[in-house]
Structures are given as structure tokens and as C-alpha cells.
Image (spheres, grey):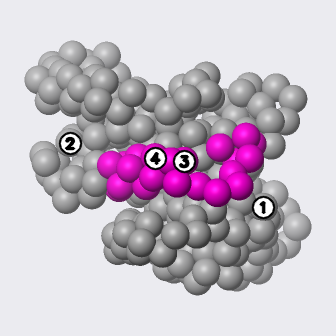
Amino acid sequence: EYMLSLWSKDTYFESGFGLVNIFFASLGFTFQEYMIVLSFAILLTMLSFALKYSKYPALFSAMYFLVFVMEYVFTRNYLAHSIIILAFFIVFEKVKYYKGLFVLLVLIASSIHSTAIIALVFAIAFYQDQIFNFKKALFGFGILLVFSILFFTSLLLPLIRGSDFLFKYEAYSTEGGFTTVLFAHLMIVILVYYYFNYILKYSIGINSETRRLFVLVVNVNICSLFFLSLYYHIPYFGRILRLLFTFDIAFLLSGLFYIKMLKVKLPLYLIILSVFL
């Protein structure tokens, strides 16, 4: 009954999350058992991701533990972000129709938590096999941020008046502006961009497939600059940083594997530490 009470007409929780609760409730699971199974499935996904894409899975696991502690109490976010990680898994492996499957999984994730829909912006990264022009991207997303500041209230909000999206906006909206979340995200993207440019310049023995993955990681981070326009109005969207953190740390650690020169490795360690903190 408790799990069913988590999803009712009065809670406004998404339908996908409701179906998950109904499924486990129909099996007779208690809430504790439900959370154990859910956490096991999510951690198994993360373990598979780490073993596949991190050269240092033990170190990744230790760093991911911080995210796990923060995410565990936000069940819907936790589940939705894990589905998006699974979607990236499919993209990295270039499964047949991976672009369409990515969109499908993001839509499923958004049925768990509606804010996951913003992850669709990452799909732009799949259509470029070279790193995006960073200066042009910064300029473009800067223009978008200015446009958002000027016209979000007058143009966008009237379009969603009377919809569930407006309810979500009102529920999650807090005092925005140029918050620390906005600047932290921007700094992480800048660090990731220069980090992998360093890796690709000084790497030894990196193959074309690994290079493709590193380029994809950088482009996903650049695409995430779109979120700056959201943070200005709804800092709550900063939770997406936990997803980005999980995604980035695995590949930041892997990048070190290809660097043999200590004088190059040391600043890269500092970048990883900066992103982690």
C-alpha cells in the first residue's frame, strides 16, 4: 500500500514511475525489498559501465560512491539517470539503430522523472565525429542564455500555461540567476574539453574506437551547455550534474591510461580532482 501511495492522482508522479511501483507491489514486495532490488539493478548497470569503459574501475567505483549516496535518496532521479547511462551504453557500442534507441530510452527515463527529457539534447553529439568548435559552441549557448533571460517568462511560460509542465516548473522553480550550479557546470565542461584535447594530443597507443569515444564524451559535455539556460530559471536542474559526473569520471580516468609522460599526467590528475570536488 505504501508503494502504491507513492503514485496517485495527488502526487503528480510520472506514469512510468507509477507502473514500476505497481509492478513491485503486485509481486508483494515491501518498500525495503523494492529499494534493494532497484538499487541492485542500478548498481549492476553502473558496474557494467565501469568495467567496460574505465581503465580503473576500482577507482571509479570509489568516486562514484559519492554520487550513489546523493542519488539513493532521490529514487526517481536515480532510476531515470541510470536509464540514460544505459542509453549511452547502447550508443558507445553502436548497437543497430542506436540513435533511435537512445531517444526511446530517454523518453522512458522521462516517464520516471520528467526532467530527464532534457537529455535529448545529447543526441546532437552523435552526428559529429570531430570535436565541436568550442568557441562557436560557447558563443551559441551564450546567445541562448541571453535569450532565455530576456524572453523565458514572456514567451515560453504562456505556451505551457495550464499544462503539467507548468505545474512542474512551479514545483521546482526556486530563486535562480547566476548560481554556483551554473558556473560549476561551465567550469566542468571547460576542464573536460581541454583535458581530452590534451589526451588526444599526447596519447600513446590510442586506437580509433577509443578516440571516437573520447570525442563523443567531449561533444556530450559541450551539448550540456544548453542546461545553463535552464539553471538560470530552475537551479533544480543542476541534479543532471550527477549524471554528467558519472559519465565524465569513467572516461577522465581512462584517459590517464594513455598518458605515459609524468609531466603531462600531473596536471591531468589535478583536472580530475577539480571535477570531482
Question: Judging from the image, what secondary structure is the residue with disc 4 in?
Answer: helix
**What residue lies at 57% left-to-right and 40% top-to-bottom?**
215
Counting from the top left corner in percent of width and height, residue 222 is at 42, 38
User: Of the residues under marks 3 and 2, which one precedes in the sequence?
Assistant: 3
Is the Cβ of the residue at disc 3 closer than 8 Å to that at disc 4? yes
Q: In the image, what residue type sits under mark 3?
A: Leu
Label 2: element kind: helix
Residue at (64% x, 35% y) in the render = 107
> Which quarter of the picture shows residue 139?
top left
Please identify the quarter of the rendering in which residue 227 is found: top left
> Label 4: few (<14), some or many (≥20) within 10 Å?
some
**Which numbered dot is residue 52?**
1
Is 140 a magenta residue? no
Q: Kindly identify which residue carries mark 4.
A: 197
* Residue bearing mark 3: 200
Amino acid type shown at disc 1: Lys
**Contact, mark 2 vs mark 4 (Cβ under 8 Å):** no
